[in-house]
Amino acid sequence: MMSRLVSSVSLVFLGLLLVLPLLMIDGLILYVGDASYDSFVGCLVFLLCFYFASLVVSVVFDGMMRALGGLFKHRFSNILFAIVDGSVSLSVLLWMDLYVKSITISLATKVVLVSVHTVLFYLIHQSSDSTASSSEVSAQHEPIVQEAIRLLEDTDPVSCVEQLCLKYPELPKKDIIRIVYRLHGN
């Protein structure tokens, strides 16, 4: 029983740590904007409900966008993702504002709030895409990495790069240098 309580409290604490920066940014936007609310706690609950509702609705649209993303070029796909994500967030915020009477937010503040969320989630989406593509590149260069490890045991990095360039002429020299530099640094 006690271990479940500790794990539940730690999960809630971790969740709050992840949401805290977003709460601070949104709190600043609401403070600067034309927002009026009955209580501070009510405002925090409103924001947490907005995050949760937006997350639930975005999961559905994100799945559809990822499925459709293969039809478009990568850059256009990411821009389309940002537009859909912003539209979904704005509609969730407008819908919540319609039913919650304890907080009043002007349209301009809502647009700023959603724009900040869209930019943050777009950057996160871009970051996850670049991480995935770098792991694909690493898998593609696995034989070269193994060869470089073997060569670095016997030769210096410059000779290693030269030998790898001769053995793999189809690869850009820049990629080979990056691989050897990373391995030599470790």
Image (tube, rainbow, N blue to C red):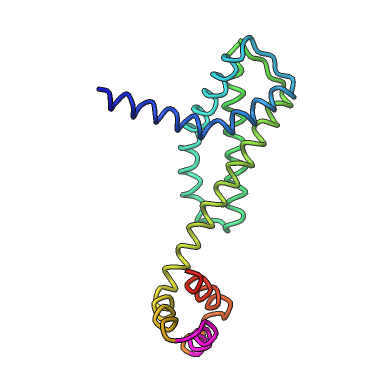
Q: Residue at x 50, y 39 (%)?
A: 61
Q: How many marks?
A: 0
- Relative to the observer, which residue lies in front, 117 or 71? 117
Using residue 34 as the reference point, say whether residue 183 is left or right of it.
left
Using residue 5 as the reference point, say whether residue 180 is left or right of it.
right
The span picked out in magenta is 155-166
What kind of secondary structure does the magenta stretch mostly adopt? helix
Quarter residue 98 falls in: top right
Q: Compared to 20, does 126 lie above or below?
A: below
Residue 186 image offset from top left, x and y in percent = 47, 68
- In the image, farthest residue toward the left: 1
Using residue 123 as the reference point, say whether residue 18 is left or right of it.
left
Quarter residue 100 falls in: top right
- Relative to the observer, which residue lies in front, 75 or 49? 49
Residue 97 image offset from top left, x and y in percent = 61, 18
Magenta-span inclusion, residue 102: no
Residue 163 image offset from top left, x and y in percent = 49, 89
Residue 88 image offset from top left, x and y in percent = 57, 33
Q: Compared to 130, does 9 lie above or below?
A: above
Q: Residue at x 38, y 26 (%)?
A: 9
Q: In which quarter of the image is the N terminus?
A: top left
Q: Compared to 185, does 168 lie above or below?
A: below
